[in-house]
């Protein structure tokens, strides 16, 4: 009976389309912050945080804390393999990251963008982390 309960709990997690969207956003194995996952799922960040807490509690995702940010990623590659197996039963393959319609618009923003009055994206993070690593400046 324990196996049946565990299986039904995982099925309940995946049965909600916004949760499935969150899982698919993590399909490439990268860790993403709540705000990015909320954007991709089309829901607000507080709802996303509640969904993520359920995934973490079930052992499907893990959280990595980096400063004040929490990044979520798959607990293991097996999580996505199981999702792909479910899609295979349905007869449709999962969309690759390259074939997702919003990816061409999002990729450049991930590299560099302006956020209010500062530089953001990978470039912004790299520029702000470099002086901190060399102890030449401090955050207040």
Image: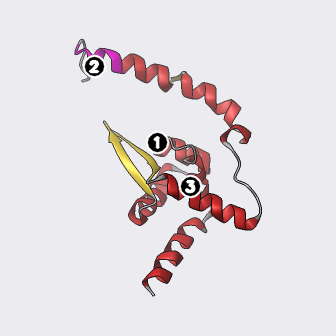
Name the residue beneath numbered marker 1: 31
Question: From which residue to which does the magenta span run?
Answer: 129-135
Quadrant housing the N terminus: bottom left
Q: CA distance from mark 1 to mark 2?
A: 22 Å
Residue 12 position, x and y percent, is 55, 72
10 Å neighbourhood of mark 1: few (<14), some, or many (≥20)?
Answer: some
Identify the residue under disc 3. Answer: 80
User: Looking at the picture, how far across and down is residue 61, in whole percent?
Assistant: 44, 55
How far, Cα to Cα, is label 3 from label 2? Answer: 34 Å
Query: Which type of secondary structure does the marked residue at label 3 adopt?
Result: helix
Would residue 38 be seen by someone viewing this image from the given angle? yes
Q: How many marks?
A: 3
Q: Is residue 134 magenta?
A: yes
Q: Counting other residues with Cα less than 10 Å from the Cα at mark 2, is it few (<14), some (14-19), or many (20 or more)? A: few
Q: Nearer the viewer, residue 51 or 9?
A: 9
Residue 119 visible to the viewer: no
Answer left or right for 30 relative to 136: right
- Considering every residue shown, the one lying at the far right of the view is 91
Residue displayed at 43% across by 54% down: 75
Q: Nearer the N terminus, badge 3 or badge 2?
A: 3
Given contact means CB atoms under 8 Å apart, are the residues at marks 1 and 3 in contact? no
Residue beneath disc 2: 133
Label 3 vs label 2, nearer the camera: 3
Name the residue: 60% across, 60% down.
83
Quarter of the rendering containing residue 128: top left
């Amino acid at each position: 009976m324990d196996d049946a309960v565990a299986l039904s709990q995982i099925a309940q997690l995946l049965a909600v389309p916004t949760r499935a969207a969150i899982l698919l956003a993590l399909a490439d194995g990268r860790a993403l912050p709540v705000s990015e996952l909320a954007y991709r799922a089309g829901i607000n960040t507080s709802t996303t945080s509640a969904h993520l807490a359920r995934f973490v509690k079930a052992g499907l995702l893990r959280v990595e804390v980096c400063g004040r940010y929490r990044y979520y990623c798959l607990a293991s590659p097996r999580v996505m393999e199981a999702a792909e197996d479910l899609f295979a039963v349905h007869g449709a393959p999962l969309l690759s990251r390259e074939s997702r319609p919003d990816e061409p618009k999002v990729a450049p923003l991930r590299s560099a963008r302006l956020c209010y009055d500062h530089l953001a994206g990978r470039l912004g993070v790299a520029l702000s982390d470099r002086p901190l690593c060399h102890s030449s400046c401090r955050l207040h």
